[in-house]
Image (cartoon, helix red, strand yellow):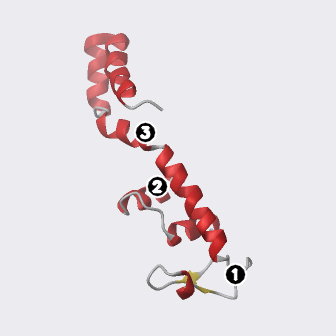
Amino acid sequence: MDKNLKQKIQRNSGSVNLIHALESKWVGAEWTIVNYNYKDLKWFERNSAPKPTEEEIQIEIKKLQDEYDSLEFSRNRESEYPPIVDQLDDIYHNGISGWKNTIKAIKDKYPK
């Protein structure tokens, strides 16, 4: 999943919506929308691809939501890893083995 899209979904409380789906699968297409509602989706004629159906968009939303949800362990780990400066200091003072113990504890807490 694109990092930018991942951040947008995260800002949306982890919920994928119609706009995320359009930005993911129909990259570069031009459109406007009101109220996140398919019936209000205006697809510009200059697009090379035809307007996606509501079903195609729902399939993309589900795919993106499943992918986002499957990476929860990664987001949890990321929030608990010490800053890289602290990790380097840990390696300096405790060696690679000491650092690995710190990281392993977080990985064990949030398994894949």
Camera-nearest label, 2 or 1: 2
Q: Do residues under tags 3 and 1 come within 8 Å of each other at their CB atoms?
A: no
At numbered mark 3, what does the secondary structure look like: helix, strand or loop?
A: helix
The residue type indicated by label 3 comes to: Ser
**Going from the N terminus, do you reach mark 2 or mark 1 first?**
2
Q: Do residues under tags 3 and 2 come within 8 Å of each other at their CB atoms?
A: no
**Going from the N terminus, do you reach mark 3 or mark 2 first?**
2
User: Is residue 27 depicted above or below 95 in this figure?
Assistant: below
Q: Where is residue 16 in the image (x, y as percent from the top left)?
A: 47, 63
Residue 47 is marked as 1
Seen at 65% across and 72% down, the residue is 55
Residue 97 is marked as none
At numbered mark 1, what does the secondary structure look like: helix, strand or loop?
A: loop
The residue type indicated by label 2 comes to: Lys
Q: Where is residue 72 in the image (x, y as percent from the top left)?
A: 42, 43
Q: Do residues under tags 2 and 1 come within 8 Å of each other at their CB atoms?
A: no
Camera-nearest label, 3 or 1: 3
Report the residue marked by disc 2. Answer: 6
User: Is residue 51 depicted above or below 80 in this figure?
Assistant: below
Mark 3 Cα-neighbour bin, 10 Å: few <14, some 14–19, many ≥20: few
Quarter where residue 13 is shown: bottom left
At numbered mark 2, what does the secondary structure look like: helix, strand or loop?
A: helix
The residue type indicated by label 1 comes to: Asn
Q: Which of the two residues, 64 or 24, is positioned nearer the viewer here?
A: 64
Residue 74 is marked as 3
| 80 to the left or right of 53 | left
